[in-house]
Image (cartoon, rainbow, N blue to C red):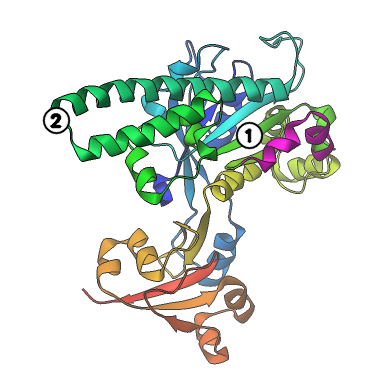
Amino acid sequence: MGAGTKAGIIGLAGAGKSRLFQLLTGSPPQQGRPEPRLGVARVPDPRVDALAGIFRPRKTTCASVEYADVPGVAKGQGSSLVDLPALRGVDALVHVVRAFESELAPHPEGSVDPLRDVEILELELILADLGLAERRLERLASAIAKQNRAEDKAERELFSRLKAALESERPLRALELAAEEQRQLRNYSLLSAKPQLVAVNLGEQHVRDAEGYLASSGLAVWADRPGVRLCPISAPIEAEMAELPPEDAAAFREDLGLAEPGLDRVIRGTYDLLGLISFLTAGEDECRAWTIRRGTPAVRAAGVIQSDIERGFIRAEVVAYPDLVEAGSLAACRERGTLRLEGKEYEVQDGDVINFRFNV
């Protein structure tokens, strides 16, 4: 996890996903023919800045998400996504769907209809996965005929279930798979199995009432689907704000009724979709946020920093972020009794500030 958190940005041609990628990662516009590319976005976390104000460290480091931007696809071209190296190993997909009008860039389907577009690309992912499942079943049939191994038979049973779901136009993320089955499938680029953040790319006329637009367009029902989240954003407006001084951007945002930058919502939405949280470390050298999955025990969280700390784990000194900020120092937390010692199995909480004691 941590730097290993990776999401692929996909969408139909003209949805605005490359512009969103540029805004998220600070990458320059692409020249010439579109090619897959990678960039890193910092996870916005004001807690890191607040800790830096207390500890005055030499360095501050936020958590990060790596985003892969791939060329837009047209109806009937979803299979082109399956073999893209940039999408291999992604933890989630950010599906950018167009909800803005533009005379300069007419919609390839002739009209702006985000619900139709979401359904088009969902079907493309399902058909791409179906092709992959059919090819895998052919190879397994051949292997079973030659060697008759039990593990190949078990995998054939799994892929037969996947094929049946895909043929009924169900995305694989809607299936309940055992942990062992999920592990088996990690080597395959099954795109409809990935959790999906639907980034609805709004025009300025819909930004003030994004929730109303999601409901009236029919998109709101997608939020109830397994492994799917909706995130309204306006890449054109975010691009305008990026050109402004911070105080002018804040005033523009306030005028539009936006509580925070849309880019922050996309990054946090990716985090939330994957069940990720951040714990914090703080000291004179560095104040830093580290990414873990919700439910991670302290000993495993220690390993995210360094494998030696996990191996030699003794105890974790833990204080909740609000308690540390209120007290003003670790020494004051110790006096107040809010700094406590936890063992290996302690479940790390979002915003825990931790110092690991270890001996190697």
Which labelled disc corresponds to residue 198?
Answer: 1
In the picture, measured across the screen, residue 246 lies left or right of residue 9, that is right
**Label 2: element kind:** helix
The magenta stretch is 211-225
* Quarter occupied by the C terminus: bottom left
Q: Is residue 353 above or below residue 101?
A: below
Which mark is nearer the camera, 2 or 1?
2
Name the residue rendered at 29%, 68% in the picture: 309
Residue 3 lies, with reference to residue 97, above or below; the image says: below
- Residue denoted by label 2: 147
- Where's residue 324, x and y in %? 57, 76
| Viewer-side residue, 161 vs 45 | 161
Q: Nearer the viewer, residue 36 or 41?
A: 36
Mark 2 surroundings within 10 Å by alpha-carbon count, few (fewer than 14), some (14 through 19), many (20 or more): few
Q: Residue type at mark 1?
A: Val
Q: Earlier in the sequence, mark 2 or mark 1?
A: 2
Q: Residue furthest left?
A: 147
Q: How far, Cα to Cα, is label 2 from label 1?
A: 44 Å
Q: Position of residue 281 (x, y in %)?
A: 45, 67
**Callout count:** 2
Q: Quadrant of residue 54?
A: bottom right
Name which residue lies at 70% across and 44% down.
246
Image height of 155 relative to 356, above or below: above
> At label 2, which amino acid type do we have?
Gln
User: Magenta stretch mostly in which secondary structure?
Assistant: helix
